[in-house]
Image (cartoon, helix red, strand yellow):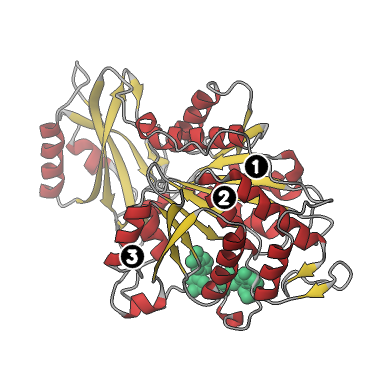
Amino acid sequence: MSTPITVAYGDGIGPEIMEAVLSILREAEAKISVDVIEIGERVYNKKWSHGISPSGWESIERTKILLKSPTTTPQGKGHKSLNVALRKNLELYANIRPCISYHPVIESKFDKFDVVVIRENEEDVYTGIEHRLTGDSYQCTKIITRPGSEKICRCAFEYAKKYNREKVTCLTKDNIMKMTDGAFHAAFDCIAKEYPDIKAEHYIVDIGIARVATEPEKFDVIVTENLYGDILSDIVAQTSGSVGLAGSSNIGSEYAMFEAVHGSAPDIAGKNMANPSGLLNAAVHMLIYTGQVGTAKLIYDAWLKTLEDGIHTADLYKEKRSKQKVGTKKFAEAVVDNLGKKPTTLSELIVGSSLDSKVNKTQGDFNQSYKIRKLVGSDITLAWNKSADFDQIVKLFESSNLKIIAIYSKGLAIWPGSPKSLSDQITCRFIANNEKKTITNSDINSLLVKLEENSFDVVKMDKLYLYDGKEGFFS
Ligand code: NAD
């Protein structure tokens, strides 16, 4: 039985590479039935602000699988990123990007390089929650949830299991962001215990990325948060040889999207020059996702053999290593001719026997991870254009239900003691000033009213809780 998939030809080189890839899938007898939708520039121009029409969404909702060519995001106001819309609407929480060096066939900086970057796709600073607090201060909110972190870490270990990988490395900055990155790291440690046969390690992200860039052979599967993953996956893709080679999978609990890593390359569009390999690799992973492992391997082997034969598109062509410079169509024909043949130098695709496991949605559900939560204070941020004399504000609350125990500027304690730096906003830490060391929301409301009555300009308020006695805030 064939699997229905939605196919989008996209912009720029998109239609050429999609034609090439579909011709290879057809000849390899992939069991897919294709529903074509329009996305990108022409749809943006029809005033669908995300570059996809309602009928496009309907098709994806029906098939649950999208094979997508790159699109051009039009400049100017009113247009929203199609990829962000797809990721958010389809809840594609995992971006999986295998990056491999094809040494000695393709020139690359490293001989041995086979790294898979698994990037969390829904959380972190990419939620777009940003605020201007004052004239000179801006804030971006980083959201990390325990279920979201568990889901992506489980996805990484499941990937390692399925593709016979030995190690999963987690990258965070939990030496600085102890709560958000600390939660991600803790989720990783917890999930790692369920996979005793796979080695688990953690690096602080800066040294981790430096090591990936200099000793990539020491890494296998890497799992990390959205922003670090965004930066890392481009570094890894660049190091591996050509932007035209890598494909990526975006996986959710219900939907999946497969695409090349590169963009629509308008500079070479319509010239029959584009390398279809990135999209072909994405399609190979789509076939594995649909359970067609044999067909995926057949195509991947034929593609490797074509590279070994020295049949290269212009982006890969080197006089010393290549034999024939070909266009997009001829490259696809060469891959078709090689169906059934095996590569002799390059490594074949290793896929375990189980089907690509879609991570069970319930595994990421919210469970209350504490018994008692106690409200003990509030951090209140004020716009501040005065001197560093804080006595007036501290005295004002000395005998209230909440008193100031510290004042911070950009996270640095500037009271008590002498202020080292001052910005145009300060944060006053108010803590319960009674025997029970507990307060209510009404206490915080009264505090806000009193600040306003005394002409202090409140721009932000955060509550301070103890979770089973443990501080849920920085100190
Ligand atoms: P790009 O990846 O399109 O091109 C960068 C360079 O790589 C260009 O010189 C291009 O010719 C070359 N290149 C890219 N793919 C190639 C291939 N398959 N074969 C041979 N050479 C290839 O990046 P860009 O120029 O920054 O972006 C162009 C457009 O693509 C922009 O509108 C951008 O928003 C969009 N874009 C879309 C996606 C997506 O849809 N997923 C991703 C990235 C960029």
Position of 259 with respect to 422 (left or right) is right
Label 2 sits on a secondary structure element that is helix
Give the quadrant of ligand 1: bottom right
Q: Which residue is mark 3?
A: 56
Residue assigned mark 2: 285
Disc 2 CB within 8 Å of nearest ligand 1 atom: no
Q: Quadrant of residue 358?
A: top left
Q: Is residue 467 above or below residue 320?
A: above
Q: Earlier in the sequence, mark 1 or mark 2?
A: 1
Instruction: Using the numbered discs, state the Cα–Cα distance from disc 1 to disc 3 in whole angstroms.
Output: 40 Å
Q: Check disc 3 and report its element: helix, strand or loop.
A: helix
**Residue 304: x and y, percent?**
74, 56
- Label 1 SS: helix
Q: Pointers 1 and 3 in contact (CB under 8 A)?
A: no
Query: What whole-number distance in Å separates the C-alpha atoms at marks 1 and 2?
Result: 27 Å
What mark, if any, has residue 65 been given in the picture? none
- Where is residue 371 drawn, in percent x and y? 28, 17
